[in-house]
Amino acid sequence: MYNSIYDVVTGPLAWFGWAVFILGSLYRMASLYSEAKKKDVSSLAYVKASYGFNSIMHWITPFATLGWKSNPAMTVATFAFHICLLAVPVFLGAHIDLWYQWFGVSWVALPDTVADTMTVLVILAAAFFAYRRIAVKEVAFLTTWKDWMTLIIAVAPFLTGFLAYHQILNYQFMIVLHVITGVAWLVFIPFGRLSHAILGWYSRVYIGSEFQGVRHCNDW
């Protein structure tokens, strides 16, 4: 029974998740560009690669913007969360084994202890974000159920992966739940609030171009 369910979630369900992620991402980028051409042609006229590059480089560097400097705790949590969020799924040994099994390709994996520590950092950072949404009045006022759903979907594969790796609760149930939450992650990225993973660069290019090219000031 377990083997059949595992084969389904790591087979057809996983392929479905990747298909939605790839095709949905292409659709969102194409539709966003088309919408900008129809409704805001001027925004495209002053877009310049160098402005976007300057903006992106500042915003992906810790404490390189006024916003990052104004809230050090949030900055540390945000960078730790995103770095670990990207590195663990790509460089986890168990995931690389699956890529080798399916496509015959592999690359260097993180040591298990490092991947485990980074997983814990993702969970702790998510707990910090949840705390802010409850305890900080300004953040709580703006928080909706969509923000909570986004946070839960983002951290669920890491929490279930941690529980499965350490064999806390039922391992077989947890590893299946880990794959299902990972697929939910892929499906949600193009169409939910996690879309900044694929569209965030364009926002920075747009805002950076507007500030530097039109207002003649920096956006960081």
Image (spheres, grey):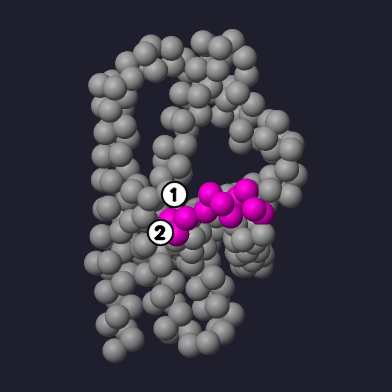
Distance in Å between CA atoms under marks 1 and 2: 9 Å
Name the spot of residue 24 as percent of width and height, x first: 28, 46
Of 84 and 220, nearer the camera is 220
Look at 44% across and 77% down and name the residue there.
175
Tell me what residue is drawn at x 42 percent, y 37 percent. Answer: 199
Position of residue 31 relative to residue 81, above or below, is above
Instruction: State the SS at label 2.
Output: helix
Name the image quarter holding the N terminus. bottom left
Residue at horizontal 45 percent and vertical 42 percent from the top = 196
In the rendered image, residue 17, in percent from the top left (x then y), is placed at 30, 59
The residue closer to the viewer here, 94 or 73, is 73
| Left or right of residue 151, residue 122 in this image | right
Tell which circle, 1 or 2, labels the residue nearer the N-terminal end.
Answer: 2
Q: Dividing the picture into quarters, in which one does residue 97 lie?
A: bottom left
Foreground mark, 1 or 2, reads: 1
How many discs appear?
2
Task: Say which of 8 and 55 sits in front.
Answer: 55
Kindly tell me whether residue 129 is visible in this rendering.
Answer: no
**Which quadrant of the structure image shows residue 42?**
top left
Residue numbers of the magenta segment: 136-146
- Mark 1 residue type: Leu
Work out whether 99 lies above or below 166.
Answer: above
Q: Which residue matches tag 1?
A: 194
Dot 1 crowding, Cα within 10 Å, few <14, some 14–19, many 20+: some
Question: Label 2 sits on what residue type?
Answer: Trp
Where is residue 135? Give x, y as percent. Answer: 67, 59
Tag 2 residue: 185
Residue 104 lies within the magenta run: no
Does the CB distance between marks 1 and 2 fall below 8 Å?
A: yes
Q: Quadrant of the C terminus?
A: top right
Q: Residues within 10 Å of mark 2 (few under 14, many from 20)?
A: many
